[in-house]
Image (cartoon, coloured by chain):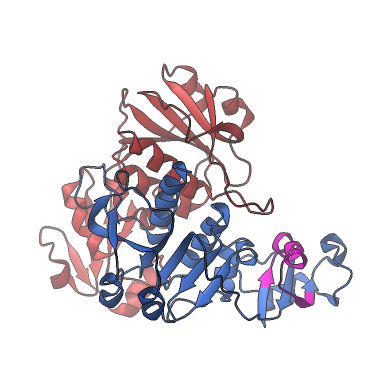
Chain colours: A red, B blue
Amino acid sequence: MFLVEGNKTIKEIPLSRYKISEIFSVNPSELGIKEISTTEITPNELKKISFLQHPKDSVAVCELLEPVFSQDVPVQLILDGIQDPGNLGTIIRLADWFGIEQIICSEDTVDFYNPKVIQASMGSFLRVNINYQNIENYLQNSGAAIIGTDMDGENFYQFDFPEKFNLIFGNEGNGIRPNIEQLLTHKITIPRFGKSKSTESLNVSMAAGIILGQIFSEK
Amino acid sequence: MFLVEGNKTIKEIPLSRYKISEIFSVNPSELGIKEISTTEITPNELKKISFLQHPKDSVAVCELLEPVFSQDVPVQLILDGIQDPGNLGTIIRLADWFGIEQIICSEDTVDFYNPKVIQASMGSFLRVNINYQNIENYLQNSGAAIIGTDMDGENFYQFDFPEKFNLIFGNEGNGIRPNIEQLLTHKITIPRFGKSKSTESLNVSMAAGIILGQIFSEK
């Protein structure tokens, strides 16, 4: 089972393939889902079961599902060891925004059922396929281009994105692992316009947003 | 006074206009700043004075400075009531990345000296002018274009950004205030490519990153 918090996202679950088994709510009438067993609780009880610093209105207990895997998607994201739940949630949200159907995660990427990931995805996990598998094996058999971000890649503004590709993002601290880096068919870089060399490289989810923004400018 | 945490950022302070008055460090020799009074402390003491969930190595107490204001910058960001410290820090980091010299904040925008903002900016606050003022007055007297994001603005991919402009970002929940919205000379939108209407609009700092990414694609 996994938890989804907040009426707004909970209301979207029945529109997805996920199933709610039980709801705990401080205000069931406001949530307005009648078909599912709902227990009214106090704000204090909510505080105890919530994973949020500032608990919302309701918590839904949902059933874990077998992941869906699409063999043939034009653009998909491959995550190599993303650890921060906020980053994964944000990347799921970006995928949903840009209409990217599928994210494939290395087996050591943070679990997307982690309550912080679910929260950061703002309901977008309901609309994006998220798979965990050996991405090295997967990429070895992928016929599509494999594009990764790198400090010394080609300026992504000048890069001509192919019709079909895997876009790889690596771990927050260590980047893309060497065995995956070897499989890259292209390396791209977001150029830094500021002059200071002390400027930290962009956070991985921000880099993903900026790159996706650019890719879709051509569509 | 305000606090800066972590050796990496603390080492950059002497290269900026900011001044450290005192350092507390679990390992002063690793920090290697000799000219400033440094007290060696235990990890437990660091835990007590740190604002971070996972305290780093050192904390520097720095002097608050009068803000610097540049009258004439080609592109600047105007923040209308940003409340989340992480968002402000991320936007400062983006400004630094894209070489944007100045951010003007409404008086009710979160204080950039807030330890969470300083932390999220990853040292970038040292390299960007950040002012707080009445942005309505400021914009009324700005000769440059005033561009805001809006749900029904022009597709930003098709928008021709002028040479000189103010780019406005509004509050996380409420967007740009009506009195500021009235002053906009242009409204732009990041189009959503995903088909679901349930998809949440992008977080303000992500929107800022995607828009800046696009602006600089033309430079």
Q: Is residue A18 visible?
A: yes
Q: Is residue B67 above or below residue A92?
A: below
Residue at image point 84% right, 60% down: B30
Q: Where is residue A127 in the image (x, y as percent from the top left)?
A: 26, 43
Taking the image as drawn, is residue A114 in sight? no
Residue drawn where x is 41% and y is 20% of the image? A144
Q: Whole-percent x and y of residue B81? A: 39, 75
At x 52% / y 56%, what residue is drawn?
Answer: B94
Q: On screen, B50 above or below A134?
A: below
Relative side of A177 to B9, left or right: left
* Magenta residue check for B15: yes
In x, y percent, where is residue B151?
A: 23, 58
Kindly indicate the quadrant of the structure image that contains residue A66: top left
Which residue is the extreme one toward the left? A34
- Residue A11, how many percent across, how many down? 19, 58
Q: Give the range drawn in magenta.
A: B4-23
Nearer to us in this view, B178 or B197: B178
Between residue A206 and residue B15, name the one nearer to us: B15
Q: In which quarter of the image is the C terminus of chain A?
A: top left
Above/below status of B60 relative to B189: below
Q: Does the segment drawn in magenta span residue A94? A: no
Horizontal side of residue A214 vs B115, given as left or right: left
Q: Nearer the viewer, residue B160 or B36?
A: B160
Specify the quadrant of the image occupied by residue B83.
bottom left
